[in-house]
Image (cartoon, grey):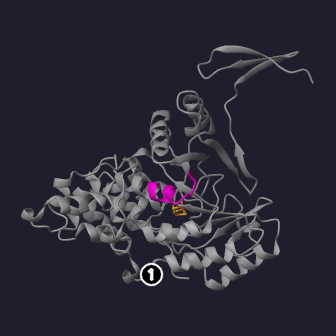
Amino acid sequence: MSGLSSNTDDSLISEADEPPQRRCGIGVASLSSILSFADKIPAKKVIASDACIAKTRFPLSMKSARFLRKHHHGISRTQWNDWHWQYRNTLRQAADLERVFHLSPDEQAALYHKEGGLPVSITPYYAAQIDATNPTHALRRTMIPVMAETIHSKGEEEDPLGEDNQSPTPCLVHRYPDRVLFMTTGQCSAYCRYCTRTRLVGGCGRPLYARTEWEKAIAYIQEHTEIRDVILSGGDPLTLGDETLEWLMQQVRDIPHVEVIRIGTKIPAVLPMRITPALTRMLRKYHPLWMSIHFTHPDELTAETEEACIRLADAGIPLGSQTVLLAGINDDAEVLARLFKGLMRVRVRPYYLYQCDPIQGSSHFRTPVQKGLEIMRALRGYISGYAVPTFVVDAPGGGGKIPMLPDYVTGHDENVLHLTNYKGNPYQYPDAVP
Ligand code: SF4
């Protein structure tokens, strides 16, 4: 099953065909800066109707505008906002990265040391959001490898969650009683250096999942009537072309006992222009459909990402976020509060905060669990309860997600419960007599 190649450029909806969109409030490039370089519109023709068209197009944040001007001179804004163009121009080789970033000796060593393993892949859009000169920049650390990735520490494993042992067919994981994880593809548009499925994605290990593997998975779901929830994941299912994805969604939706379909994706953060009107029109046919979007840091909340999330929400898809707690990247209550509050503004409900899984070469990303508990205590009460995700450890070996909760109960006498509130103040609650 090929991924991005399954759609031709001809199938893309043109931006001019897009319906008017609402404003975007996050860091949009000013109209004059957009028009000054992108669309080759002669200045004298920038009249009210042109300005109106520019406002209704997919947005272009300041960082994207600067990157486009610097690295893709002559490319129009329309091309930039074509997800196929983004995919074709993805940074994959060390030389591509060297053109864009001032690489540190550590990053250079890791890029040239690489043999096999998780590939490097950064869309031009996401590269535009990354600091070109600072190797400690949060998003940069999630995408560009360093030599610490080659160190395998005690307790780290290739398949820390024991997914392979819970796979009745190669692209299914059946861990919980009523739901399955369907790994639709091994492809992502950008590869996160801490990915739990490093062994499967980006051409590592298994090849991309073939149609015959999908058919085996569908047959398994058909036979197992206890399955009511199917999570399409990967890799990233939204790297598939619309027709391919729709074929799969139709197959799953046709199974009478499947009530809910979910999609797990990072696309709105790394390739937001993939969320086209054509895609959302297709997705809304398969309700109830939910989506979990992988976000890492508030720097991902750009005008483009906001637009992508709003398009999905307007298609009636409830959106939740999944975030991995990462040392030196987002292990800070203030950073996560900004992320979670920002997600609420773009209609994404923070869903899970994950303790980083112990994959091989992940020690530089992992924080003590205690750090996560402290962050949860610092968030609860200070931001809306809707904006506070559940902090979980995914149990090694396949035990599933275990919620980690700060302890607010300090004691229990007879029928009195001793509690502390979010400020640490003591309270007594008269518990009900059994
Ligand atoms: S998008 Fe998800 S599956 Fe792809 S590399 Fe990142 S964490 Fe892994």
Q: Position of residue 69 (x, y in %)?
A: 19, 62
Q: Residue furthest right?
A: 434
Q: Position of residue 353 (x, y in %)?
A: 59, 45
Q: Which residues are magenta?
A: 310-320
Q: Position of residue 130 (x, y in %)?
A: 34, 53
**What secondary structure is marked by label 1?**
loop
The quarter in which the C terminus is drawn is top right
Q: Say which residue appears at 67% left-offset and 81% top-offset.
A: 213
Q: Is residue 383 magenta?
A: no
Q: Say which residue appears at 22% left-offset and 65% top-offset.
A: 71
Disc tally is 1
Q: Dot 1: few (<14), some (14–19), or many (≥20) neighbours within 10 Å? A: some
- What residue did someone put label 1 on? 7
Q: Is residue 82 above or below residue 133?
A: below
Q: Say which residue appears at 19% left-offset and 64% top-offset.
A: 38
Indicate if the residue with disc 1 has its beta carbon within 8 Å of ligand 1: no
Q: Is residue 315 magenta?
A: yes
Task: Work out whether residue 43 or residue 140 is closer to the camera in this orientation and state it.
Answer: 43
Q: Say which residue appears at 74% left-offset and 57% top-offset.
A: 398
Q: Is residue 205 above or below residue 374?
A: below
The quarter in which the N terminus is drawn is bottom right
One can see residue 237 in this view: no
From the viewer's perspective, tell me whether residue 294 is left or right of residue 161: left
Task: Work out whether residue 296 or residue 250 is closer to the camera in this orientation and state it.
Answer: 250
From the viewer's perspective, tell me whether residue 430 is left or right of residue 209: right
Q: Position of residue 295 (x, y in %)?
A: 49, 51
From the viewer's perspective, tell me whether residue 38 is left or right of residue 246: left
Under mark 1, the amino acid is Asn
| The image quarter in which residue 49 lies | bottom left
Q: Residue furthest front?
A: 49
